[in-house]
Amino acid sequence: MRKIVLYTLMSLDGAVDSPDRYFAEPPEDGQTPEFDDVMVDFERESIGNQDAVLLGRGMYDEWSGFWPGTDFQPFSDFINGVTKHVLTSTPLSKEWSNATAVSGTLADVVRDLKAQPGKDIGVHGSITLAQSLLREGLVDELRLLIGPAIGCTGRRLFEGLDLRRLELVSAVTTPSSTLCVVYKVS
């Protein structure tokens, strides 16, 4: 059966809103963070096991205006080509290849997606959706890029969650002091 895999960039203290502040080489405004080679390999491995993405509506609206015009590899080709399921109660107002609106309870949407044949289903960005998936116990795996920064402002991915035990699958330190961590969610 397919897995729901939450992939996100975060600071060491759990902030998820401004990933450009978490990594060694802050990019210009509106750009994606600079990744070292180990981080790129981790991202390539993560998205290589996914053939669908579940996005929240806000992330869809933001990304559908950004990613089609960029060439930040390997994510650009992936996100522009992958099947995108957008959790929303209203029709999509922007066109983006392979995007479909889905509605219903989160548990039903996830159950239906996981029952289809295919690879893993990624959740990228979409922090409110990610928090809801975590709260409802619907995430199977966490793939985290944890940048070497603390004292960051903004939302925390794990804020307000009940105690949950995780099983460490792998952890790698990169040349830029980022941690690439994979946890199985029990």
Image (spheres, rainbow, N blue to C red):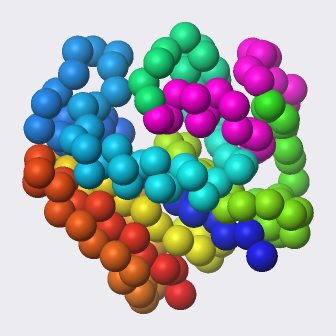
Is-magenta flag for residue 86?
yes
Is-magenta flag for residue 59?
no
Res. 153 visible in picture: no
| Residue under the point 29% across and 61% down | 180
Res. 66 visible in picture: yes
Q: Which quadrant of the figure has residue 153?
A: top left
102 displayed left or right of 139: right
The picture places residue 121, in percent across and down from the top left corner, at 68, 57
- How many discs appear? 0
**Is residue 75 placed above or below 129 in the rendered structure?**
above
The picture places residue 118, in percent across and down from the top left corner, at 80, 60
Nearer to us in this view, 153 or 3: 3
Nearer to us in this view, 104 or 11: 11
The picture places residue 114, in percent across and down from the top left corner, at 80, 67
Nearer to us in this view, 116 or 29: 116
Placement of the N terminus among the 4 image quadrants: bottom right
The picture places residue 170, in percent across and down from the top left corner, at 34, 76
91 displayed left or right of 49: right
Q: Which quadrant of the figure has residue 117?
A: bottom right
| Residue under the point 76% across and 40% down | 83
| Residue under the point 67% across and 62% down | 120
| Residue under the point 26% across and 38% down | 35
Q: Which portion, as a residue range, is magenta?
A: 74-97
